[in-house]
Amino acid sequence: MKIAFIGLGNMGGGMAANLVKAGHEVSAFDLSEEALATAGDNGCTTFTDAAEAVRGVEGVVTMLPNGAIVKSVYTDSVIGKAPEGAVLLDCSTIDVATAKEINAKAEAAGYDMVDAPVSGGIAAANGGTLTFMVGGTEKAFARAEEVLNAMGKAVIHAGDAGAGQTAKICNNMLLAISMIGTAEAMKMAEKLGLDPQKFYEISSQSSGYCWSLNAYTPLPGVGVESPADNGYQGGFATGLMLKDLKLAMEAAQTADASTPLGRHAKELYEQFAEDNAGLDFSAIIKSL
Ligand code: NAD
């Protein structure tokens, strides 16, 4: 397929390269000259204007920082500029309301569109092993699937427009809560004189079993290898976790959902991010 890719940062750069590897013809645009040059080295055709990049394509993928930027890119440079009938895929993590609004505008203008945020970080983006959670009609999903398969290991249809973003923020709210809970329990065990490795061995095979403990142990030298063993570098940045928790709390308010632990997790990550936004989110254990 001929595909335009807009937003070639930490995540989008590797995703665009994987589309090229899968045999797609990729027209790339980013405001950053450096990101654009790397995309050129990876086999994309580069453009200095987004509206030019989407001309004549069958699909458009965006991987951008936030909802305001996604909205302006679709309004100014994609809808009405890409050929009618093209399939549009926004893979950014943005708020549910904006995702639904852009989808409605795109569908009204004759496009099929999905919100398709990802689970998995930069390594998964580079390796083509992302998980995509997708919101949109059956038809839009079927068209988007072929494009997403080239960039991920799992592509799941979550429901109608906005359902992908809903799945993403609910998942990450759960992750934040479970990481703080894991960190609290490990530190408390340690303070009570229990060897943290023994606690890991016991709890990871008991009812404390969870991803944060079993697959991402937040203490260095304990449990499985994780960013904790690398000074909390790499992995999923605290600043990005905070972004997702803010989106989750906004959505909870609009849905009148009760999320006391989600709210508290957001407050704790807010405090921790003041000086540690670049560290992996499991580093929150250092604040306990
Ligand atoms: P990033 O900041 O590295 O990349 C964003 C890119 O968008 C940059 O290259 C920037 O120049 C470009 N950009 C900004 N405004 C633009 C515009 N108007 N037109 C064209 N290009 C523009 O961010 P990232 O880490 O790649 O994250 C992208 C999205 O993926 C975010 O929504 C983030 O929440 C989500 N995400 C990131 C991770 C991660 O681990 N980094 C994991 C899951 C989801």
Image (cartoon, helix red, strand yellow):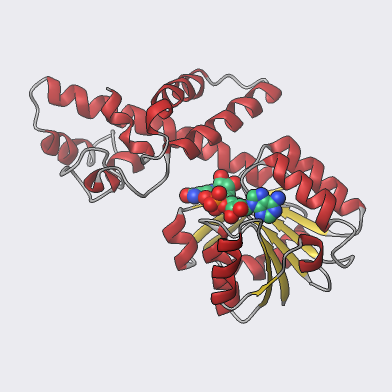
Quarter of the view holding residue 45: bottom right
Asked whether 145 or 207 is in front, the reply is 145
Question: Where does the image place residue 39, in percent across and percent down from the top left?
Answer: 58, 70
Residue 184 can be seen in this image: yes
Q: Residue at x 55, y 56 (%)?
A: 9
Which of 134 and 229 lies nearest the eye of the viewer? Answer: 229
Horizontally, residue 10 falls left or right of residue 20, namely left
Question: Is 250 placed above or below 78 here?
Answer: above
From the image, which quarter does the C terminus lie in? top left
Asked if residue 284 lies left or right of residue 46, the reply is left
Residue 117, horizontal then vertical, whole percent: 60, 50
Where is residue 185, by image quadrant? top left
Left or right of 96 in this view: 280 = left
123, 77: nearer the viewer: 77
Q: In the image, what residue occupies the spot 91% across and 51% down?
A: 108
87 shown above or below 267? below
User: Which residue is pictured at 27% across the width and 29% down the height?
Assistant: 286
Point out the residue furthest to the bottom here: 23
Q: Is residue 115 visible from the viewing direction of this image?
A: no
Image coords of residue 192 (percent x, y): 11, 20
Residue at 59% from the left image edge and 78% from the top image edge: 43
